[in-house]
């Protein structure tokens, strides 16, 4: 469907920005003052919206959308599939028997009823009613995409169980708001009425030629290459990072920017990444809810715009073996409605004491819930990155930089902060020295790095919805804040109790702080000595999702019920198994129908050539042909035997019954079988006439664009 509004090239950027969003400016313009105010109260305080107000808003939205060419509307939601879902309805209403009007009611705006049974529910359906509904989230703006008015919504079962990623995210934002406000009040802060978490996700992706992409069944079905001999050139020359952007990619990026700006997504920087054909996009940060919606939209728009430029956008975490995979850096902070970033060291002793307490809350949270952070980024695709010396290790630790670490050490020890100040640093009495926000200080190997006024959680894979990691981050930090507030609210002397609280937190949780090289094997050993977890794979990590302490955490803050947690655990395991199974089946098919026939044909050609030479005269040497045929035959025999084994093991996996056993079998057996198949096939690729090879090679995909 052609979007009628995409062709207006003459618009200026300020005019273009947010032009497809029913944002605050449009609402102010188009809604009666009373309605506007009521709506603002709803989105800011999470209050319920009156039906009569909903009718007015719906009508204004429809008029605005129709003016921009929209004919349909949809409730836009984020089920557990990891992508977004929509079900389009037309605005058209028959009037009499020969006319139509465009209509959209408050009821249609507020609630929808998609068929819940076609979305994963992880056993919730069995326990609760099959039907689900979507409900408008007024805290994220409606927008127009493909001539359709999209209304951001949550998706729940009729029993109230969340079937999506947005509901628990909104719940987690409420919880951290509540707990952070308790802390702020203790510091005498009365003007702040709302605390929100902010997120800026940096998105990595690959762009390759679409026609080549189409020829590879593995890329089309699995998003990653399952075969491919190593190209003579990898990324060793480091000539791609921040390198000149090619014209076709440049055109894609310009087009992408315009599409994202229309949706009010402020894409800010774009540059080439380390790997060939890899790029990155970073938006300006916003609140966690909008950032999540925007990132989902960004991924969708990237794919669509790429197709317009005859490119395929790969969001898989590891599309190519031996080449860096793609991640997503979740920049996260906490800020007040008065514009204060609570993770920014301040100018006064009071602000600094407050900063240190929030910092300690994050330290405590990350240490106590390492397992949940690891679970929140676990997926089949990301297993190929974490711990593979290109992405953070699977061990969760925190980078604070030398300066801040030194400060914490001196606070803990009650000693003077080395050289920089003559006396002991008293919390709430002294100010902190300034420490550099400088990028040179960054440690690229750390999974969770303090970067001056925010934390950068770097373990996310490029394909992941950022909802999960942010639900976990918000909840675990809220829990730490609530424990701190419990102690401080009871304190006789706030100053002394605060001092003690900060000291004991540092001493108890400092094991999570590590400023060194996360890729080194020494760190693995050291982390083990410190008692940190090292959950290498998704099946290793997922059981922690339903560990007793984590169920207690999520139910205490009403983020997930026990049933919701168990259902999500099941869905994650199932997804892991299904993805691995599709990969294994794709390998079998490509090997049997493409690779083995190609190698066999080439061997036949060589045999024919050898026979012809020998017919000419027995004295003509056909050694090259015969040796190559021998080697090809050995490899094809080996490959076909390995494929048969993989095939048999897929069938075995299917019969294993319970999902945890199946997932573990994939991890322990199928992956090894797949590796063996790939080795034989890649060896065949390296010696087969390129004219016979049935699909594009790594060189074609990565360099011939
Ligand atoms: P770089 O990493 O290139 O130095 P920045 O540090 O400015 O760039 O930002 C990287 C990402 O972090 C951007 O998406 C940015 O919007 C986001 N970011 C910056 N400040 C915050 C904040 N307070 N909260 C959340 N994200 C932020
Ligand atoms: Mg970054």
Image (cartoon, rainbow, N blue to C red):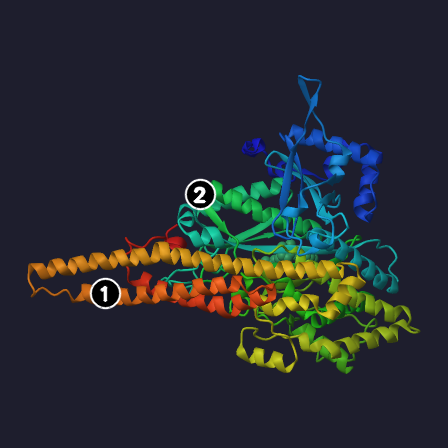
Residue 266 appears in the picture as rendered: no
Where's residue 577, x and y in %? 55, 61
Check disc 1: other Cα within 10 Å, few if <14, some if 14-19, many if 20+.
Answer: some
Disc 1 on helix, strand or loop? helix
Which residue has dot 2 on it? Answer: 310
Depth check: give the residue in front, 78 or 471. Answer: 78
The answer to whether the residue bearing label 2 lies less than 8 angstroms from the nearest atom of ligand 1 is no
Sequence-earlier tag: 2 or 1: 2
Check disc 2: other Cα within 10 Å, few if <14, some if 14-19, many if 20+.
Answer: some
Residue at image point 54% right, 73% down? 519
Where's residue 668, x and y in %? 51, 70
Depth check: give the residue in front, 432 or 682. Answer: 682
Depth check: give the residue in front, 647 or 133. Answer: 647
Q: Is residue 120 above or below residue 309?
A: below
Q: Is residue 218 above or below residue 649?
A: above
Q: Name the mark nearer the viewer: 2 or 1.
A: 1
Depth check: give the residue in front, 584 or 374. Answer: 584
Disc 2 on helix, strand or loop? loop
Residue 226 appears in the picture as rendered: yes
Which residue has dot 1 on it? Answer: 628
Where's residue 448, x and y in %? 64, 67
Which image quarter holds the N terminus?
top right
Residue at image point 66% right, 56% down? 122
Q: Tell whether label 1 touches label 2 (CB within 8 Å).
A: no
């Amino acid at each position: 469907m052609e979007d009628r509004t995409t062709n207006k090239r003459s618009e200026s950027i300020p005019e273009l920005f947010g032009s497809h969003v029913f944002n605050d400016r449009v609402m102010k313009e188009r809604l009666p003052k009373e309605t506007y105010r009521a709506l603002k109260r709803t989105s800011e305080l999470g209050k319920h919206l009156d039906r009569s107000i909903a009718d007015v808003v719906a009508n204004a939205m429809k008029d605005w959308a129709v003016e921009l060419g929209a004919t349909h509307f949809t409730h836009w939601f984020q089920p557990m599939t990891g992508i977004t879902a929509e079900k389009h309805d037309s605005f058209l209403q028959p009037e009499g028997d020969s006319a139509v009007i465009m209509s959209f009611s408050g009821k249609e705006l507020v609630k929808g009823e998609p068929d819940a049974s076609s979305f994963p529910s992880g056993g919730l359906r069995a326990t609760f009613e099959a039907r689900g509904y979507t409900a408008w989230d007024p805290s994220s703006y409606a927008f127009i995409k493909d001539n359709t008015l999209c209304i951001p919504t949550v998706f729940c079962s009729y029993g109230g169980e969340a079937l999506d990623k947005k509901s628990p995210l909104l719940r987690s934002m409420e919880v951290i708001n509540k707990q952070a406000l308790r802390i702020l009040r203790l510091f005498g802060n009365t003007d702040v009425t709302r605390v929100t978490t902010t997120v800026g996700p940096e998105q990595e992706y690959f762009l390759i030629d679409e026609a080549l992409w189409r020829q590879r069944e593995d890329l089309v079905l699995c998003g990653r290459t399952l075969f491919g001999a190593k190209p003579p050139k990898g990324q060793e020359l480091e000539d791609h990072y921040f390198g000149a952007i090619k014209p076709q990619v440049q055109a894609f990026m310009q087009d992408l920017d315009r599409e994202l700006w229309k949706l009010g997504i402020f894409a800010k920087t774009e540059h080439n990444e380390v790997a060939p054909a890899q790029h990155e996009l970073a938006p300006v940060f916003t609140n966690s809810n909008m950032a999540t919606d925007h990132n989902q939209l960004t991924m969708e728009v990237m794919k669509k715009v790429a197709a317009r430029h005859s490119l395929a956008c790969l969001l898989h975490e590891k599309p190519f073996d031996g080449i860096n995979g793609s991640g997503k850096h979740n920049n996260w902070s906490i800020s007040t409605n008065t514009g204060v970033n609570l993770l920014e060291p301040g100018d006064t002793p009071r602000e600094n004491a407050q900063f240190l307490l929030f910092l300690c809350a994050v330290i405590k949270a990350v240490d106590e819930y390492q397992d949940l952070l690891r679970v929140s980024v676990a997926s089949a695709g990301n297993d190929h990155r974490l711990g593979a010396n290109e992405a953070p290790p699977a061990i969760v630790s925190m980078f604070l930089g030398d300066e801040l670490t030194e400060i914490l050490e001196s606070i803990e020890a009650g000693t003077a902060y080395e050289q920089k100040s003559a006396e002991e640093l008293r919390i709430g009495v002294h100010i902190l020295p300034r420490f550099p926000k400088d990028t040179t200080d960054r440690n690229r190997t750390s999974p969770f790095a303090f970067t001056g006024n925010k934390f950068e959680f770097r373990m996310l894979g490029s394909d992941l919805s950022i909802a999960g990691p942010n639900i976990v981050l918000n909840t675990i930090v809220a829990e730490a804040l609530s424990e701190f507030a419990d102690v401080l609210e009871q304190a006789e002397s706030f100053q002394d109790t605060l001092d003690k609280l900060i000291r004991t937190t540092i001493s108890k949780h400092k094991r999570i702080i590590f400023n060194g090289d996360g890729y080194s094997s020494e760190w693995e050993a050291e982390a083990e000595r410190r008692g940190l977890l090292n959950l290498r794979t998704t099946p290793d990590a997922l059981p922690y999702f339903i560990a007793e302490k984590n169920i207690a955490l999520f139910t205490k803050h009403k983020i997930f019920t026990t049933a919701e947690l168990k259902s999500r655990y099941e869905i994650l395991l199932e997804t892991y198994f299904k993805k691995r199974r599709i990969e294994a089946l794709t390998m079998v098919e490509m090997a049997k129908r493409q690779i083995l026939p190609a190698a066999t044909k080439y061997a036949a050609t060589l045999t024919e050539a050898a026979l012809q030479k020998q017919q000419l005269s027995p004295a003509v040497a056909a050694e090259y042909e015969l040796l190559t045929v021998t080697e090809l035959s050995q490899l094809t025999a080996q490959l076909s035997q390995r494929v048969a084994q993989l095939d048999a093991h897929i069938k075995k996996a299917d019969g294993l019954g319970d999902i945890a056993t199946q997932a573990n079998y994939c991890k322990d057996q199928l992956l090894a079988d797949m590796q063996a198949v790939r080795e034989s096939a890649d060896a065949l690729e390296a010696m087969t006439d390129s004219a016979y090879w049935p699909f594009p090679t790594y060189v074609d995909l990565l360099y011939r664009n």
